[in-house]
Amino acid sequence: MPENRKNRTESDFHQRRIAFIILKSCILTAESGFVGSHFNLLCQSGFDEKKARRLIAEAPRGYALDGNVYLYQGADFSCLSAENRKKAKAYVSFFQKNGWLSPAGKIYDGMRSGEIGSVWIPIKEFEISF
């Protein structure tokens, strides 16, 4: 794919989704139409690059798109650790209340990286049972 089309496809995807990062005591969400990465979101929110990289490596993050929520951690978009699953479960009602998770929607855990700008294939469905 030509570079400018690839960039436009990535930008279109980023603009459609709602990016978020679950921090210790809150969830940091991107504004509607935000086209940057999670790293960009952290830096624009006041985190220095070192702290932003650490949060990308350790904190649960993801995005909401078309009534589904996608969760992952690390630069490799891996499934959440037990500790991060616990943190994410605390936000399920937030996802529902804000319309990110539709009544028929699913929450996914981990992503298999694919073509930039496409919805990547989730590794597994997130278990919501408490």
Image (cartoon, grey):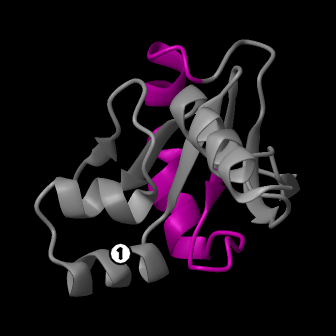
- Few, some or many residues within 10 Å of mark 1 (<14, 14–19, 20+): many
Magenta stretch: includes residue 17:
no
Residue 100: x %, y % from top left: 56, 22
Question: What residue is rendered at 15% in x and 68% in y?
Answer: 47
Judge by depth and name the residue closer to the eye, 28 or 81. Answer: 28
- Is residue 77 rendered magenta in the image? yes
Question: What residue is rendered at 49% in x and 63% in y?
Answer: 60
Which residue does the image show at 10% across and 61% down from the upper left?
46
Q: Position of residue 108 (x, y in %)?
A: 76, 48
> Vertically, is 112 above or below 30?
below
What x and y, as percent, mark residue 96? 54, 20
Q: Position of residue 64 (x, y in %)?
A: 59, 33
**Residue 4 visible at all:** yes
- Look at label 1 and name its amino acid: Leu
Residue under label 1, please give it. Answer: 55
Q: Residue at x 40, y 54 (%)?
A: 21
The answer to whether residue 130 is visible is: no
Of residues 88 and 130, the one drawn nearer to the viewer in this rendering: 88
For the residue pair 104 and 63, the one nearer the viewer reads as: 63
Query: Which span is picked out in magenta?
Result: 71-100
Q: Quadrant of residue 33?
A: top left
Image height of 20 relative to 72, above or below: above
Placement of 77 over or under 105, stated as above or below:
below
